[in-house]
Amino acid sequence: MITPFRIVAAAGVLLVTGLFTTMGHAQNASWQVLRDDPVIHEGLTVIAVGRQIQSVCDDISPRLMRALGFAEGLGDRGLELGVPRRDIHAFIDDRGEQQRYREVMHAWFAARGVDHRDPEAVCRVGRDEITAGTQIGRLLR
């Protein structure tokens, strides 16, 4: 079991040996690879938009198995790009990156003339995406 003491001790060792800085640079480089890849960017945008739609629309729900498979495919893409799995997970879990994709999602709706805070408009877009069979629509029902 990992205890807070062990985490602090490990961080101290890394700091003393200089690996902490090196790891931070490596992670930043890995994250930039993920940010710059159009497949991952588009995929995370699809997930962010789909989550917004299903979170505000009572009549729309996620297709969980499809969504899981889609997310796994994005993770595989990151591995193909040479990004270690731990960096992929850290990227996805990072609050700053999550905020960045919320902003991307806001821009996605705005580009379609929709306020992401307007449930009626968001649900209309969601139903349109489902009907059109887009990637977003295939992850929803």
Image (spheres, grey):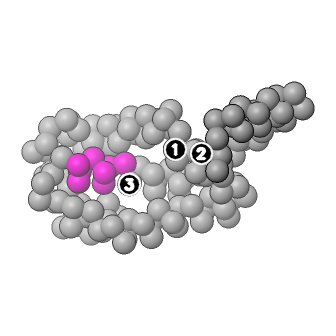
Indicate the amino acid at tag 2: Ala
Specify few, some or many for label 1: CA neighbours under 10 Å numbering under 14, 14-19, or 20 or more. Answer: few
Q: Is residue 57 left or right of residue 45?
A: left
Residue drawn at the location 18% of the way across and 46% of the way down:
56
Cα separation, mark 2 vs mark 1, equals 5 Å
Q: Is mark 1 on a helix, strand or loop?
A: helix
Q: What element carries label 2?
A: helix
Residue highlighted by disc 1: 93
The magenta stretch is: 48-55
Indicate the amino acid at tag 1: Asp
Specify few, some or many for label 2: CA neighbours under 10 Å numbering under 14, 14-19, or 20 or more. Answer: few
| Residue found farthest to the right | 17
Location of residue 19 by image quarter: top right
Q: Main secondary structure of the magenta part?
A: helix
Tag 3–tag 2 contact (CB < 8 Å)? no
Q: Which of marks 3 and 1 is nearer the N terminus?
A: 3
Tag 2–tag 1 contact (CB < 8 Å)? yes
Indicate the amino acid at tag 3: Val
Q: In this view, does 18 lie to the left or right of 141?
A: right
Give me the disc on residue 46: 3
Quadrant that contains the C terminus? bottom left
